[in-house]
Image: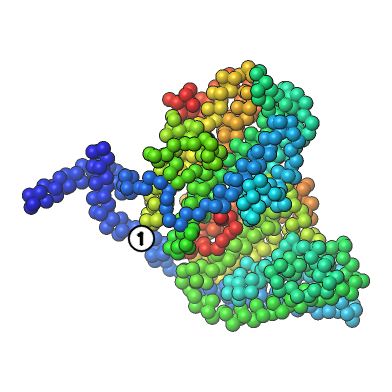
Amino acid sequence: MFSSNYIGFCRKALLVILTGVLFISCKDENPLNKKVDFDRKAMLTNWADNIVLPAFENFDHEVSTLATKVTAFTTNTGTVNLTDLQQQFKTTYLAFQYVKAFEVGPSENVSFRASMNTYPADTVKITNNISSKNYNLHAASQLDARGFPAMDYLLFGNNTNIETSADAKAYLSALMQDIQTLTSSVNQNWKAHRNDFINASGTDIGSSLGQMVNAINKDYEIIKNAKIGFPAGKKTLGKPYPHTCEAYFGGFSLELAEANIIAIHNLFRGTYYDESQMGLSLKDYLIALDAKHNDLALDVVIDDQFKAALNALSEVPNPFSSSVVNEVSKVDAAYLEIQRNVVLLKTDMPSAMGVLITYQDNDGD
Amino acid sequence: MRKLTLSLLSIASILMVSCDKDETDCACSPVEQLPTTYNFENVDHSGQDQRLDMLNEVVSYVKTSNDGLAVDENTVISMLTNQGYTWTKTELNSSTKQIADKYSDEGGSTIGGWIKALEQISQNPGTGSNGTAGLVQNAGATKQYLFNDKGYELAQLIEKGSMGALAYYQATSVYLSDSKMNVDNETVTPGSGTVMQHHWDEGFGYWGVLNDFGSAGFTYDNTADYHRFWAKYTNAVNEHLMVNSKLMQAFIKGRDAINNKDYTTRDAAITEVRDTWELVSAAMAIHYLNGAKADIADDALRNHQLSEAIGFIWSLSFNPTQKLSDVQINDLISNNLSNLYEVSVTDLNTVKDQLANAYHLNDVKDKL
């Protein structure tokens, strides 16, 4: 009893003395107070001018091209056949993979990703919408009857005869108009948002760095879970659910996943959208901070892990919906390599930068 | 008065000097100031409580296989994914929570395999024996279990495995990991605290105990709702390891440190939680190995207890600071417990001794 009080007193007394000492020695170890020679505003400028805005511009362009073809197809006024349409749909869906990670500012305002790409599509709901001529797709309950997944079903699904049914064509037009209106406005709003984006150059929660680090992490986890994990049964006791693949009917899920990873990898490296050169980005920031992971340079570890993920993914045969059943070990290997980057991007990188992960990842509660 | 002050001061300075020499961990929070219960403000682990309630019904259902009833894989999956299943505990029917997506990926996949296998062997089972799946009774014909052809009781593996791959995994590998601890600790949401506090509380929730568990005035009640899963088995080894209070104190220490934004102490508490919880699993494995040795000649009782032991050994792999590697854990099982009808006392002692060595349980290994 006595000895316990004795130690307690001792600890308290020492705490008072040590606090001052610790306070001084701790100061240098706080990443926020670390003086680093890095121009965050130049990084944000590179992101906006060379990556984000060009990616949106390109996506907007592809959407317009798709819209023109949809019009020609549905009105039989041109020479566009279903194969042409499917081709352009795939090109546009791929272009979307290069903007979907940037769910901040104008994109976040309209829940761009969820509006464009909630899957698996509810084919029963879509069929009902077609027969009841319901083209009002803005309710939350219509998210899985809208956007690319709904269009994937119309253009590639066997049960819908898009070539002969006027109602199905009308629904296709409605989907197209919805995608085009939304894309065009988000693209314009991003241009208007450019200066605000660049000027929010701190590291706090509202800063562009903080928001982008959160956004790319959230999107990367969507790749891991929705694109790969759910179809592969990673959340259902190993029982695969092939129909939950992105672009299930078109069968090009893996190409979309690859494009999505490349888009995030390119942002990490500062690679221009046109891939002509590289500018300042997260990689350079980590170098400036001298961030380490198990004594290795963190920027190199992350960069290598992106490559390992892409390599493993390239080993998985198309279509992904068959591979989750028939090529389990290759799918597992790809999932594992993708997963390995989560902790690096979500824990090591933000803590080196003093950025807080604030989004809810559905893991909680 | 002045004299008294002076002497106090001089005593203090002497004490501090001696403290400086002897107490290298003086910068830690004083242990004696910690609360004795988990009655903190803004604690909410209702999601964990609901999942344990769901798991309870899953376990009851899969154990009906021991009564000779068929278990349907799709029903178990509808329970674990909480899709289209009507729960006996009616509150659960409005729950949005599920178990399946909270399992560790690898763990969930293995458990999925056990569920599938259980469906197969539970259809019209005959009498089980070495090489043949089926029902086996103990010598007194008072107990009956459904074993696979190697003597594994799959219902036990599903239960103990879920304790490992769900609760223990979520607490030690997810909620107490950097990704859940390197989060906001400033903005208090009424009812659930800061994000960091909430994550800590959710980890605590998977233990499944009351707020005063392990405190001086606490008496364990084996008719209470908490008498299941980790609360039950922590208490089962408490007599020899004092883990009721030890694990509770570790959780309290961490929550208190988070409240005080003292992350050095929080990190020390994370280590204590992980180590103590791991110790419970290892000690329970030894407990069931002892039981199996005592019933070595009774196929039903031996295999049943060894299935429990295997579940606890397998669970050891879900702690990120596990003392035995995955390879060691796998070897322990596959080298010594691959066919429960054919095990020898030597096999069981080998496993027991390896566990006791790894977890420093040699002094109590025969009492557990």
Left or right of residue B70: residue B344: left
Locate residue A147, reporting x and y percent.
Answer: 74, 70
Instruction: Report whether A182 appears left or right of B277.
Output: right
Q: Which residue is mark 1?
A: A28
Residue occupying the point 57% across, 20% down: B293
Q: Is residue B4 left or right of residue A79?
A: left
Point 75% across, 52% down: residue = A241
Report the amino acid beneath label 1: Asp
Judging from the image, mark 1 belongs to the subunit labelled A
Residue A77: x %, y % from top left: 89, 81
Q: Residues within 10 Å of mark 1 (few under 14, many from 20)?
A: few
Q: For the N terminus of chain A, give its image quadrant.
A: top left
Looking at the picture, tell me which residue is in the foreground, A161 or A6.
A6
Q: Answer whether residue B219 is visible to the viewer in this image.
A: yes
Query: In which quadrant of the rendered view does residue A69 lie?
Result: bottom right
> Quadrant where the C terminus of chain A lies?
bottom right
Outermost residue to the right: A164
- Exactly how many numbered labels are in the figure? 1
